[in-house]
Image: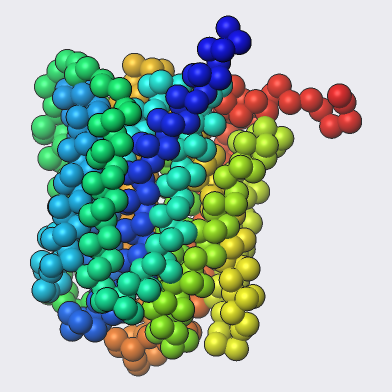
Amino acid sequence: MTNSAPSKQVDMRVMAAIVASALFMQNLDSAAIITALPSMARDLGEEPARLGVAITSYLVSITVFIPLSGWVADRFGAKRVFMAAIAIFTLASVLCGRSTGLGELVAARVFQGFGGAMMVPVARLLLLRRVSKEDMLSAMTWLTMPAMIGPISGPPLGGFLTDAFGWRSVFFINVPIGILGLGLVAWKIPDVPPGDPGPPDIKGLLLIGVALALLMFGIETVGRGVFPVWLPPACLLAGLAVGVLAVRHCRARSRPAIDFSLLAIPTFNQATLAGSLFRGGAGATPFLVPMLLQLGFGRSASEAGLVSFATALGAMAMKPLARPILRRFGFRTALVGNALFAAAGIAVCAAFSPAWPVMAIFLLLALGGLARSLQFTALNTLAFADVPQGRLSAATSFFGTAQQLSPALGVVLATASLEASAALHGRPGLLTSADFSWSFMISALVVAASAPLFTRLRRDAGSQVSGHSAAPAPGRS
């Protein structure tokens, strides 16, 4: 018995680190492309704020295809699907780097999103099926720690590559990472035999996909004058109507595309719904900071990347602290207090100006990274704390959909608020630091709005995972 426990722990850590290669590649890509956006806009002849569609198209593609990931993993085997997803993501990265216009880039990003939709939820599923409840928090920490290297290295690497070799190299860097990830998965990850999940809910998948596409198109284009003035509101209304039909259809199915009955599990409910509100507001910040530093402060892509690096550095520093914090305070207290702390950190960003010392901006961004990292670790763990093993596939698909949709909405909210502020001040297409201040304040309010929702959790929510209820009271040994 003494030898088996360490062996199990080593296996879990090694597997988590290898599986995290997928998260590393995706996070590196997401962080690096944001730093390269102004350069991409100049090269493609587009306004910088409009290049946000290169991010939202990818995130929406992931959101549309994630509901299918659980069924595909069960039907064809999680390891096989995981490797195919890495290959697709890598190929799509090459296509992104070879794009000559915004349309080509968006199409390649949609294809890349399809690979990401199969890659990240299945990676989580591979790990969750092999850990106990008591090991879940440690497993999630080990899963996300290597993946955090992507956001840490993404901004400075994206800035350096953009300045030295052009923005296309930001996508080409995924090729060696994808090849290495494929080799490690083939070598170390055990095979998962396919099962019989039954036929996929094609109608549900179509309804959900159409609803999300219409909603995101409407949000992305409303008030921009690109299409007839009636089209974006019509798409929004149509998206809501199709969304209602999708929910009704899924509730009536025994094996739906998205299993809404999972929301009856309180911990999954709050981690998914309230967590989406937090992710939406927080997801705008990594988009806004590099843009502010380059367009508002006149910094180079390399300089913006090095300063933005602070957020991811703070996130990495939080990983070993997450477990003791959650053990001491529990999920409810930690999520409520940390949401307010994170909102305050984003609000402070509204005061940034060229007169601020770079080190002061760096330190504040690092503190913001600490807060967001704790929240994300807590949400990713709490979501699956009470989900039965037999429903993990459905839960990873549902949670993954919400997890990807909310940052997409956050980026859309940021770009819309930037353009609205510029237009109101008579500077359409010309952004200043004042426009970014409004966007930061709106994002901070969205993050703060999640805090009251987390109070609906029980005080002992997720205690089996966090160990909070078993922790000794203060002053006792």
Way the structure is coloured:
rainbow
Q: Position of residue 223 (x, y in %)?
A: 25, 75
Q: Position of residue 420 (x, y in %)?
A: 35, 79
Which quadrant of the figure contains the C terminus?
A: top right
198 left or right of 275 in image: left
Q: Nearer the viewer, residue 256 or 361?
A: 361
Displayed quadrant of residue 6: top right
Q: Position of residue 432 (x, y in %)?
A: 43, 87
Q: Nearer the viewer, residue 162 or 289?
A: 162
Q: Is residue 431 above or below residue 412?
A: below
Q: Is residue 161 above or below residue 218?
A: below
Please indicate, yes or no, whether residue 284 appears anywhere in the rendered image: no
Residue under the image location 51 percent in, 72 percent down: 307
Q: Is residue 94 above or below residue 83?
A: below
Q: Nearer the viewer, residue 460 or 30?
A: 30
Residue with the most extreme top position: 1
281 left or right of 195 in image: right
Please indicate, yes or no, whether residue 300 appears anywhere in the rendered image: yes
Residue under the image location 12 percent in, 69 percent down: 99
Q: Position of residue 123 (x, y in %)?
A: 33, 35
Displayed quadrant of residue 290: bottom left
Residue under the image location 35 percent in, 92 percent down: 426
Count of numbered tags: 0
Q: Nearer the viewer, residue 39 or 94?
A: 94
Residue with the most extreme bottom position: 426
Residue under the image location 11 percent in, 32 percent down: 202
Which quadrant of the figure contains the N terminus?
A: top right
304 left or right of 174 in image: right
